Each structure stands twice: as C-alpha cells, then as structure tokens.
Image (tube, rainbow, N blue to C red):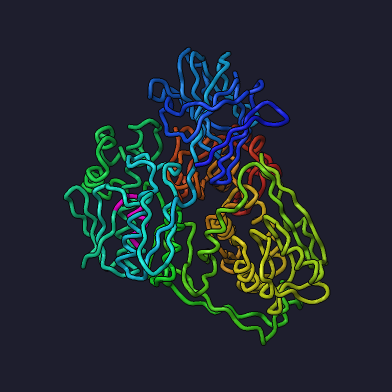
Amino acid sequence: MTIRVDALDEECGIRVRDAAEGEAVALRTDRDPDPEPASTDEFEMPVDAAVEVDASELHAPVPVPPVFWRDGEVVHRATRGDAPRLPRGTYEVDFSPPAAKLYVRVEDAEPTAVFADDHAYLQFGGASRVVVGVRSHHETPAATVTTTDDPRDLMAAVSTFGSALKTHSPDRSWPTLRGHPPAIERGDELDVPDEVAPPETGVTIEVPPDYGAIYTVAPLAYYLGATVEPASRPRLLADGQRHDLDADDLAGGVRSVLEHVFTLDCVVREAGIYPFRTTATDELEARAALDYERLFELPLAERTAAYLDVPRSATAGILAWHYAADVEAAPAYAPTLPFLVDELALVRSPPQRAERVDLTPSPDALREGDGALARSAADAATPSLSGVVPADAGTPGRSWVAESLSPGAANPTVGSFRRGFAWPQGEDPLDVHVVCNDARLAAGDETAYDTHETAATNVRVSEDLSTTELRDALYEETDFLHFVGHVTEAGMVCPDGALDTRTLARTGVSAFFLNGCRSYEQGRALLTAGSVGGIVTVDDVADDVAGRIGHHASLLLDHGVPLYGVLDVLRRTGLPADRYAILGSGTLAFRRAPGGAAATYAFDTDDARADAVPVAVQRYPTGENGMGAFVTPDYAAVDGVVADGGVHRSRISRSELERLLETSPMPVLLDGELRYTPDLTPADFE
C-alpha cells in the first residue's frame, strides 16, 4: 500500500494520503509537526506506515470519538459527555476520521479528547512527540484472477475471495478489515496469482457446478474465507461438521447462514481489542448465553462450526441486511461478482422476478394535462421501455445485473464498477455542473448542493446551453452533472435542437443526474462513454414532481447518502421513485457522510410527547462505513449500534432534539416530508 504523510503547506498539521485508494485527510497540530518516518512494530492494530510528529494536540474537523488502549486493552472510549483526562502512561489511540484509519501512539502522556463545534481535539497533556500510524482501507482488488467459462474454474476464482480478509477472527465483521476481493476476468485458461491464493481456513462450500449456485454462494465464501467445490447438493463444511443448504432456496439458505455468523461475529468481537457493547449484544444475550472469549480465540473453521450449533432463533432479526443483487446466471456476469461481494451484497442467481412492466410514454406530455407539465415531448412514435421488478428482498438497496432494465434499482456494468475506483476522494472540493435548459424552471429551486457540514462543493450553473455548448460540457472533466430540462427520443433538449449522447464517443462527466422524462437511454450512453453512473428516469415525470425529486436527491447526495439510499428515501416520502433508476453501482456515494455512516432520521410528531419525540433511524452502509461498522448515536442512551440496513426506533429528548437542530445540518424526514435541519425549529416537532 502506498501511504504518504506530509506537513501541510500553509498551517501546522499533516496530510495523510493513500495513493492506492485516492484518499486524503488532514490533521491540524498546535505546532510545526516536523514529520519523520517511524516503525510500525509498536502498534497493537495493523498499520501500513507510521510517522513521528511534534504535537501536544491533534485536531480533526469531524467529531471523531477517540478510543484509548493501554497495555493492549481498551481503557476508554471518549464521547461528548464523557472525556476525562486519563492517568499518565503510554497509550495507543484510534483517531480515525471517515476517510482513513489512523492510530496515535504516545508515551508518558495524560491524554484526553475535547469536542467543540462538531470537531474533535486529541490532547496529550504536554507530550511533544507522538507516532501516527496509518492503515489503507484496501478498497481496490489486489490482483486479477482469470477464469474460463467452465463453472469449475469459476469456483476456483471465487475461492480466492477470502484472500482479501485482513483477519480470520470475528474482527472481520469490521468493514475496514475486509479488503476488496480479487478482480475476475474471462480468458482461455485459469490463472490465479500467488498473492490471492485461497486462504487455508478449513471451510468449504459445496454446490452443483452451475453459474447460479456459484454466484449465490459467493458472498458467504468471501466472508468465511471458504473454498467452493463441486458436489451434487449444496452444503457448508467446517471442522468436520456439515450444514446442508436448501437446494430449492439456495439464496435463502445462504442468507440465513451469512446473517447468523455475521451477527454472532459483531457480538463476539467484543472479546477482542474493541470491547464495545452494542444493542445487538443486548438482544443476543436476552436469547442465548455464549462464551465470547472462547469463541473469539477459536480458529475460523471451529468457530464457524460452533456458530452453526447456536440456534438461528438466537440471531434472527437482530441485524437487517442492506443490499441485494439479482444476477443473471451467465458467464458474462462473472466479473461483477467481486464488486457486489465487496459491499457484502446478498446475491440471488438466477434473478428473482416479481413482475415485468411496460413503460409507455404519454403523448403531448408538454401540454397541460391533469394540471401538470411533464419534462418530455413524447409522441406516439416514441418507443416504450420494458422493465423488470425484482421480488422484494427486504433490503433498502438492490441491484439488477442482467440484460433487462429494472426501475427503482441499480443497473450496473463491469466498466462502471471499475471506474468507481476513480471517483474523487479526500478533501478536494467536488465540481458540480448544473445545466438548466428550461426557461420555466429555476436551477436554484431544484438543487441543494454545497450544504455538506465539512466538505466543499464548487457549483456552476449554466442556462439554455446550445447543442454545441452542452456537448462541450459533457466532454469537460466534471465530477457531477445535474441536468434540469427536457429529454426526448432525439436527446437532451437545447434551444437549437437536441443533443443525442449516443453520438458521443467519450465523456468527462464522472456521474450525473438527468432529471428529464425518460432519460434512461441518454444516461446509458454516458455510462458507455465513460461515466461511473448516476440517476435517470424511465418514464414521464411531471415538472413539480421532478423538481421536488431533484431537490431531495441533491440534498441527500451532498450529505453522503449513496445512490441506493437516495431512491429509498424518495420511496419513503411517497414520491414516484419507481420512475427513476440508477445506472452504475448503487453504493456509489457522492461524498462521505459528515458522521461517517450515512443515515436519515425520520420523526413522527403524531406520537410526540412533551419530553421526547419518536425517531426512526435508517442507515445506508457502504464502503469503510459498511455492514458491521460501529455507530454511536449522540441522541440516545445506548453504548452503540452496529451499522446495518434496518430501521432503529427510539425516542429523542426535547433537549437533544434542540441540540441536533442547532449543531447538525442534515436532511431529515419530518412526518414523511424531507426537510433540512437549518430550516427547522423545535416548534415544528410539536
């Protein structure tokens, strides 16, 4: 991994760069840091590089909750309400902003944490020389495995996925300790590079040698570090124990096992170096008595066998999954597997269809009709689209990886997955170009970018671009393009005609939101021309509805909600999210959420009390804040929760609600309507 730590140019501090991942984070210091290379050997946690710096204080521009170790054991986890100065000694401190894993080692110090204005300050009580260790998130494949179209070769390729795990202990339930599986490409012969050879865990998954079965077990094989081998019936083998998987519902059986072992890992890991109690622990202990220390120390195969002896009823419903992917059982889709598995998505192959829908355009859509105007100029000659609605997987996010289109879901390609690695990371401002090509509409009313709490967004607004000017805008290197206007079969409407993106050989636009009727084909062309992905429409959309969706989507994207979360929130507001679709990866996040894990808070005033208001929190795990991350709700009297795809309900006191409105600018759902906290007062929650 390529880690660089340099002094900041214009102020005291250091900038940590992970060249392999495109990450960058800055920490301010109270004096010239004078960084020098240091040994990584003294750290309890694995780090890839370390530097010594002069500092009696480190400052992160986000509310990082430091975790303090002493003699290999956690002695304190600081929060806003509990951050004492610790006794003098040698400490290792996890001080990780969302964009990096940072550990600080300090000797003969009296450390403490100070929180102010949603920033965190790590103070050492006069210590002048500290060591900062950095670990790469490892979110790109370490190597590429070549497989033929023989299913047995594909089994060998999937068997390498577990090589990306950074530990075989229950700590692999932490998303930062799960690396990206090796990439897969198709070729004339099987080739497995030595650096991604299958790990020797003693766990095996047997399935019939067909693509659907292999795709379906891939996430479980990854998480268990298991080899995949051919057999007539599907089953899991661990430490001499056999667990049969339902041949008639393999996806359901795999999901049950994965949810079970993952939930147990998220609790058993408390016996390791991070002894953080969560609500998952409370729920599990009410159902079963387990020896966490013994389970934590077992080899992976023995621990897996022991987990399978725990009744499924003990873990059912404790954690909810966040993402599912329906994948066509064909060789062409094998290269998508590592990207789906990296996000720990559940895979169903062959796809589970609920229904097919025909999306027929509305003639004369620009005319007044039912009191609404639509963003198209459809006519009877416009061809209709056909789509597939997947069977409900009970997850907020879903992908459809097949030849057909799925409205309301993500429709990725291998190329869009690969280009996702180039999405801008770190502290540099994002470049957003809003193109408004309809004089009746105001771009400022539809878009709400540059509202992020800590990160900057450079927003440009262009109006009434000609076809030549719009073509130039699509050629220009731009992080995100938001189009407000009309789209027809001929292309994106301009004052002098229409620009058909299918005529473009390339594009410099990384991601996009084409908020005009039936923009799917135009967006698909941008994806083919080099974009990472974005949001498009698959049907006619009235102007007022499109305007609200555009505003909501931009606000959510700017606050770190991934694309799949945007569509989920739109569904929860009652807006017609089924008229929109994601092209590319559904887990792509516009930027990092200010608090690490993207979430929406939904408040219900109908059940409000004088002292508290009901709140339902929906998180959208992705990346280093994926399934299994630890989240500390600052409004609830709980130690913490495990990031998952479920809705967590509680009550927030009136005083905490007031503090939330004053200090945390973010989108929230208030009685089903998306609002922005700076525009709200406590009286709105009466």
Q: Is residue 400 left or right of residue 654?
A: left
- Residue 668 placement (x, y as % from top left): 61, 47
Residue in the image at 67% along x and 47% along y: 676
Residue placed most toward the observer, 314 or 471:
471
Q: Is residue 313 above or below residue 16?
A: below
- Residue 421 placement (x, y as % from top left): 55, 53
Residue placed most toward the observer, 124 or 151:
151
Q: Quadrant of residue 155?
A: bottom left
Q: Quadrant of residue 574?
A: bottom right
- Residue 600 placement (x, y as % from top left): 56, 48
* Residue 352 visible in the shown view: no
Residue in the image at 70% along x and 42% along y: 678
Q: Is residue 143 left or right of residue 281?
A: right
Residue placed most toward the observer, 473 or 284:
473
- Residue furthest out toward the bottom: 381
- Residue 538 placement (x, y as % from top left): 60, 72
* Residue 41 visible in the shown view: yes
Q: Is residue 143 above or below residue 58?
A: below
- Residue furthest out toward the left: 240
Residue in the image at 48% along x and 67% along y: 400
Question: Considering the image in quadrants, where does the C terminus appear?
Answer: top right
- Specify whether residue 537 is painted magenta: no
Q: Which residues are magenta?
A: 216-226
Q: How many marks?
A: 0
Residue in the image at 28% along x and 49% along y: 313
Magenta span: helix, strand or loop, mainly? helix
